[in-house]
Amino acid sequence: MIEIRDLAAAYSTNGVKKTIFEGLSLDAAAGTRLSVIGPSGSGKTTFLYIVSGLKRPERGEVLFNGEPIREPRREIAIILQHYGLLPWKTVFENASLGLKIRGFSGQAISGVVFPILKALEIGHLLDRYPKQISGGEKQRVAIARALAMSPSLLLLDEPFSSLDALNREYLQNLILSVCQQRALTLIHVTHSFEEAVFLGERVLVMKGQGHQLFPIKRDDDARSPEAEADFRKSDLFHSHCNRLREYLKG
């Protein structure tokens, strides 16, 4: 689904151009999951914005199903760190926003959004405003808004970083389950080794101007929630985390 060819990004300060990363090439098949990790300033979010079509690269290209990405596409949904909810709109209105902008009827919107909110366990919050719900609930509203557009590629930019540990694990499990049920392709930016390993089938480590791709093997090919929960507790899981940690340290 995604082909990235010799990608480079840069920014300019006082007329001086500085390269963030370069020479990045990889493929991501439909239905696969890629985590992206690295220190601040390594270009993780810039990479995500290029894939989303919100930013143009310095060099190289990104292909989506064989077509160059030069602008945002309806098949690609992005969920940002700070939710992006409109404070004057209710949970239902925020989750419906993309469909309303695209001209869907009220009946069609309800038919799509209600089941998603129910599946995310926030169906009872329809008339609440963002200030009346918790951080974890706000993040689920942002997820609902993205899923309502029926994307085939889901991009996440550190969406769980401000949540407590239990909410973070709950939403990691939820995203994993949603991706498996809907056969979504996932590219996920994080600062957490554990989150990168749990959500990714591969982890792209961005370090300086370089990068390295690590496969994340599991003992069991099963993809049930129970098997994934067991993986989080396994020695293999912690071995992957330590390998990423040592690479970044080195």
Image: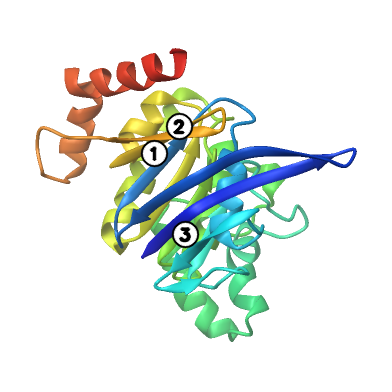
Q: Are marks 1 and 2 in contact (CB under 8 Å)?
A: yes
Q: Amino acid at mark 2?
A: Arg
In depth, the one of 155 and 112 nearer the eye is: 155
Give the x, y percent position of residue 204. 41, 38
Give the x, y percent position of residue 233. 22, 21
Q: Is residue 4 visible?
A: yes
10 Å neighbourhood of mark 3: few (<14), some, or many (≥20)?
Answer: many
In depth, the one of 77 and 174 nearer the eye is: 77
10 Å neighbourhood of mark 1: few (<14), some, or many (≥20)?
Answer: some
Q: Is residue 125 visible?
A: no
Cα separation, mark 1 vs mark 2, equals 6 Å
Label ID, residue 107 = none
Q: Secondary structure at mark 2?
A: helix
Residue 188 against residue 198 in the figure, above or below: below
Residue visible at 64% across and 37% down? 20
Task: Quickly name the residue at label 1.
Answer: 172
Give the x, y percent position of residue 88. 78, 57
Residue 219 against residue 188 in the figure, above or below: above
Task: Quickly name the residue at label 2.
Answer: 168
Query: In the rendered image, which quarter is residue 249 located in?
Result: top left
Q: Amino acid at mark 1?
A: Gln
First along the sequence among labels 1 and 3: 3
